[in-house]
Image: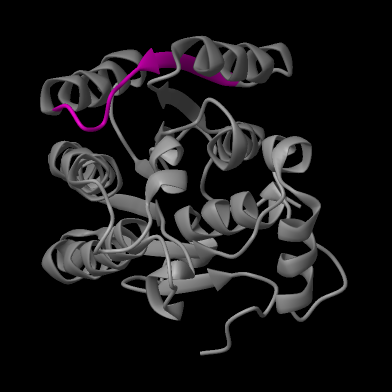
Amino acid sequence: MLVEGLKNKSILIAGAATGLGADSATRLAREGARVVVGDINLQGAQRTAEAITASGGTAIAVHVDISDDTSVQALVAATVDAYGGLDAVHINAGDMGSVSKDSDVVDIDLEVWDRTVAVNLRGHMLVTRHSVPKLLDSGGGAIVYTSSIASFTGEARRPAYSATKAGINALARHVASRWGKEGIRANAITPGLIVTPEIREGAPAEILESGMARNRTTRHGEPRDVSSMVAYLMSDEGSWITGQVVNVDGGTVLR
């Protein structure tokens, strides 16, 4: 089922070569949106964009390192140049290579902490910083951030990951508060364990079993669960939702 108000919208997805971002780009294109698939993995972004266009959608791939201000500025400019404006943004990028090294605050290598902050938090700020003026030029729009239930559950490991995700929640609330009266909405999605193709192929069985045990449904989370929420929050049907942190976790966390 399609949602209202996304057809012909110009939507930027930062972090869309694979996984949740790729699924969201595909879903938004299916809704009729014109999407920019931004990622540091340009080949992956190109594959995603090519798959979208092969299915009749509209997409281009753009290289971006969201920890780099100049690169982010170029990504936003490429979106406006390609489609004439910017209507919505989904910020999904993360340095997952650092997660396995994210131990605890006593033992963590400061380079791992700094890299996680640079991508997961500073990078999200940079995409927001350069997108907001373009959204205002379009009369407003929506920003959807990918956060995590780790932002409020508390964990014995991954302090950098959890702290940056909590920061993303605060960033969404800031944007909603600062520019809401000018037509910009901002929300964060906090997924639980989502079994992407990469996770299904590479995650140990005990991780999947643990995730299944923690949720309150009969199945694992799938990318479509997140991409459906992204589409809804960007659509006219979600137009009175802003400043929220929305769990998509199969009831893993009740709040």
Where residue 78 appears, as percent x and y from the top left, is: 28, 16
Q: Is residue 63 magenta?
A: yes
Instruction: Judge whether residue 100 can be spotted in this image.
Output: yes
Identify which residue, 222 or 103, lies in the foreground. Answer: 103
Residue 54 found in image quarter: top right
Residue 194 found in image quarter: bottom right
Residue shown at the point (16%, 60%) measured from the top left: 182
Instruction: Judge whether residue 221 can be spotted in this image.
Output: no
Residue shown at the point (48%, 27%) measured from the top left: 35
89 displayed left or right of 77: right
Depicted 190 relative to depicted 215: above or below: above
Depicted 221 relative to depicted 223: above or below: below
Specify the segment rendered in magenta: 58-68
Residue 243 found in image quarter: bottom left
Identify the residue at the far bottom of this view. 255
What is the tally of numbered marks visible in this picture? 0
Residue shown at the point (24%, 63%) measured from the top left: 106
Where residue 77 appears, as percent x and y from the top left, is: 21, 20
Identify which residue, 57 or 156, lies in the foreground. Answer: 156
Where residue 18 appears, as percent x and y from the top left, is: 58, 29
Depicted 137 relative to depicted 154: above or below: above
103 displayed left or right of 28: left
Residue shown at the point (52%, 49%) measured from the top left: 5
Where residue 140 appears, as percent x and y from the top left, is: 25, 51
Identify the residue at the far front of this view. 107
Q: Is residue 45 magenta?
A: no
